[in-house]
Image: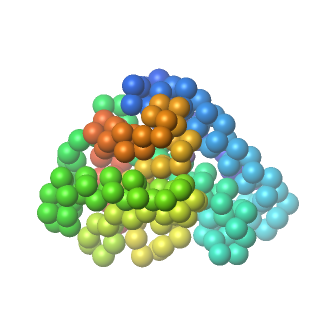
Amino acid sequence: MPISLPDLPYAKGDLAPHISANTLDFHYGKHHKAYVDKTNAAIAGQPLDDASLEDIVRASAGKDQGLFNNAAQVWNHTFYWNSMAPNGGGAPTGDVADAINGTFGGYDAFRQAFADAGATQFGSGWAWLVAKDGKLEVRKTLNAETPLTDKSCTPLLTMDVWEHAYYLDYQNKRPDYIGAFLDNLVNWDFANANLKNA
Ligand code: MN
């Protein structure tokens, strides 16, 4: 059964002016859709044809780089859309606020660590907040690499730092995009929901 392209959790214009509808037209409508189509082409008639997306990502990791790249990018992008919300960002609330204070000593230190991870990921990749062993960690991954393949942790949030995520709105100014993500877009309700399953 083919995997599907999930609907965006908001309208394409709802993240503006921080991320434009034009960016989402390309990023969701072209890039994310292409990862879905290429994954489906790769699994058609193959043993993973009926597998869940998560199982496809885990089964292909380290074994079938072409399939892994596309399937992981499908999962990462869906997780990224849900990591953002209109009027999001700023200091967290709920259990994740307590966890951030416990791990990083406060929101400002977390914000710096997450922004640094995104800014220093050379080339294409992702910045993540994950829960592991009752603490939180900021990580960065290259290209399609994803903490989904690390069963010892639970992803809470991600930020896409591939150029296609920000170039139409920010050109080369990746730090400006990162600042807008942190201050105006982070969906802390999503992070809290993920933390409950950690
Ligand atoms: Mn992307």
Residue 84 located left or right of residue 189? right
Residue closest to the eye, 122 or 164: 122
- x and y percentages locating residue 47 in the rendered image: 79, 68
* Residue drawn at (53%, 56%) of the image: 123
* Residue drawn at (61%, 33%) of the image: 26
Is 183 drawn above or below residue 122 in the view shown? above
Residue 94 located left or right of residue 70? left
* Residue drawn at (74%, 46%) of the image: 37
Residue closest to the eye, 197 or 70: 70
Residue 22 seen by the camera: yes
- x and y percentages locating residue 92 in the rendered image: 22, 47
- x and y percentages locating residue 25 in the rendered image: 59, 29
Residue 59 seen by the camera: no
Residue closest to the eye, 156 or 103: 103
- x and y percentages locating residue 167 in the rendered image: 52, 37
**What color scheme is it?**
rainbow
Residue closest to the eye, 80 or 162: 162
